[in-house]
Amino acid sequence: MASMVIRLRRKTFQTFVAVSHLPWNTSCFHSSPAAAQQPALPQSRFFPALEAAMLPAGAFRGRVAFITGGGTGLGRAMTATLSQLGAQCVIASRKLEVLQQTADEISAQTGNKVHAVQLDVRDPQAVTRCAEQMESLTGLPDVVINNAAGNFVCPSENLSANAWKSICDIVLNGTAFVTLELGKRLVRSQKGAAFLAVTTIYAESGSGFVVPSAAAKAGVEALYKSLAGEWGRYGLRFNIIQPGPIRTKGAFSRLDPTGQFEAGMLSRIPTGRLGRASEMANLASYVCSDYASWMSGAVIRLDGGEYVMMAGEFNELRKVTADEWKLMEKMIKSTKGS
């Protein structure tokens, strides 16, 4: 990883920030066909991933869903599932060509129209234009998923002010601009909607080497919990999903070409495997559906138990062998007094 320490020159920084819309919102938690993929651990057989949509067909018929970062990764997976369930989807990000290709492919698969709208979430004026364009295409949304993100790994002593600002502008400010713009329009129109933010498990714990992302994601969670309390009276609800490491096509081959980092992740996930985009899509569709209409202000962790494994003071004792436990037990029993 030493060779990946980022020198925050403009070209290098843009390369890493361009790797956005990521499952764990950290570019090193992806794999691609070129990357060395670690086999799942034996216990994973008890935790199979079901790929099919769990909600009944037509669960989102007549609904409009707006998804930022909908062209790739988790955004694409959520769009595909919502479209399959009957929603008319609008996907938005900076790369219109990628968006349009995704929109065409999903529309062909599901038979439901997916619209592609170019958007830089960092620009509030662009957000306003996007909202106006969406209203003319589909009307106001019933579902809003803030999934767009940008991130990079970097020692905090090497962070520049521009690096900090770039991540916070995408993650925190971008989510706020989209949420507030659409939220105000929904309030004025007296139309209810479900908002969902995709954050990360380290928004709760913090994490070194991704400090701007951790701080910005924590701010997103505070934003959504605050609005859940304030705007529920207008028919708006707000929830958060914290995904753990999920395998999608992405930047793993560039940041973990040997697969060693992925192997380390697997060792600390109790279920013994990485997540699937389909699992995130199923959870997101449920949270945004009428089946979860009483859910608001919730933070849901979807990580195979990784967070609690890392948080437990004595969880590393899982590495102790049976023979070592017998020896330790004898030593403990032989100890007298306190």
Image (cartoon, rainbow, N blue to C red):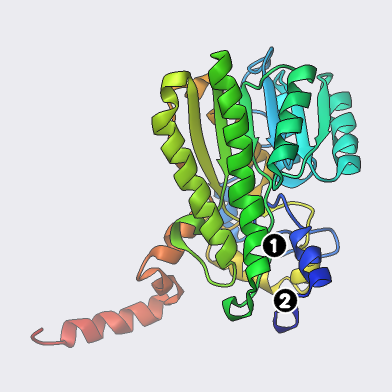
Is residue 87 depicted above or below 161 in this figure? above
Residue at x 42%, y 39% (from the top left corner): 226
**Which quarter of the rendering shows the N terminus?**
bottom right
Is residue 110 depicted above or below 122 in this figure? above
Question: Is 261 displayed left or right of 304 in the figure?
Answer: right
Distance from Cα at disc 2 to Cα at disc 1: 29 Å
Q: Secondary structure at mark 1?
A: loop
Q: Position of residue 334 (x, y in %)?
A: 17, 87
Number of the label disc, if any, that sits on residue 217: none
Depth order, front residue of 123/44 = 123
Residue at x 50%, y 24% (from the top left corner): 236
**Which quarter of the rendering shows the C terminus?**
bottom left
Number of the label disc, if any, that sits on residue 6: 2
Depth order, front residue of 236/201 = 236
Answer few, some or many: residues within 10 Å of disc 2's Cα (few below 14, many 20 plus, some between 14 and 19).
Answer: some
Residue at x 43%, y 32% (from the top left corner): 228
Most extreme residue toward the left, as rendered? 337
Q: Secondary structure at mark 2?
A: loop
Residue at x 73%, y 75% (from the top left corner): 8
